[in-house]
Image (cartoon, rainbow, N blue to C red):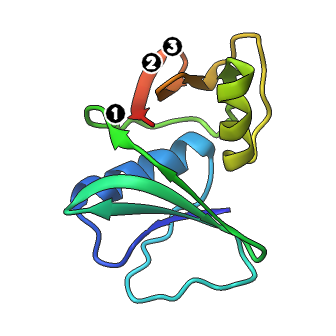
Amino acid sequence: MIVTTSREPSARTRRVAKTLARFLSLPYVNRGKQSLRDDEIWMLVVENHGNPQGFIKRTPEEEIVMNFTLSGEPKVKPMKKMVPVVQGINEEAMPVARFFDLDTSERSAPRAIIAVPGSIEFVDEGVPIMRLKV
């Protein structure tokens, strides 16, 4: 999976995309005028009036959308390559895990996406990196 943005993104949208790519240990591609290839899986961070508003996951078979409101600014910090797990209530965690192609776990992990009703929090070694209201 490759993380990118829509064309000509705002600085805030680029920060969210780069933070997401680092958090998920995925490559980030500065898209520019480059078209998306149909044979790859892409995670696009899309915006509305300069504010990040959603993720679009494009696979050769389908396109899945997750809309959100960013709560605060993402914390930009160096991160070790590590695959996160999704934690939370099953009804909330399963769709998030499927969207990001991750496993769920009830145990705490160094890097986790915590899904609770109404929000998703990205946590790295106990430090909240980004919170989305869904």
Real-space CA distance between mark 3 and mark 2, rounded to the nearest whole angstrom: 4 Å
Assign a secondary structure to mark 2. Answer: strand
Residue drawn at (44%, 78%) of the image:
31
Q: Could you tell me which secondary element the residue under label 1 belongs to?
A: loop
Q: Residues within 10 Å of mark 1 (few under 14, many from 20)?
A: few
Q: Are marks 3 and 2 in contact (CB under 8 Å)?
A: yes
Name the disc covering residue 127, or none. 2
- Label 3: which secondary element: loop
Image vertical order of residue 57 relative to residue 67, above or below: below
Instruction: Count residues near mark 3 (Cα–Cα under 10 Å), then give few for <14, some for 14-19, many for 20+.
Output: few
Q: Nearer the viewer, residue 65 or 17?
A: 65
Q: Is residue 83 above or below residue 35?
A: above
Disc on the earlier residue, 1 or 2: 1
* Residue 24 image position (x, y, % from top left): 61, 44
Q: Position of residue 75 (x, y in %)?
A: 34, 33
Q: Is residue 48 above or below residue 102?
A: below
Q: Mark 1 and mark 2 in contact? Answer it, CB < 8 Å.
A: yes
- What residue did someone put label 3 on? 126
Q: Are marks 3 and 1 in contact (CB under 8 Å)?
A: no
Q: Which quarter of the figure has residue 77?
A: top left
Quadrant of residue 128 within the rendered picture: top left
Q: Residue at x 40, y 33 (%)?
A: 133
Q: Quadrant where the N terminus lies?
A: bottom right
Q: Which mark is residue 75?
A: 1
Taking the image as shown, residue 61 lies to the left or right of residue 29, namely right
Residue type, numbered disc 2: Val
Looking at the rendered structure, the kind of residue marked 1 is Lys
What's the distance in space between the residues labelled 1 and 2, CA to CA? 9 Å
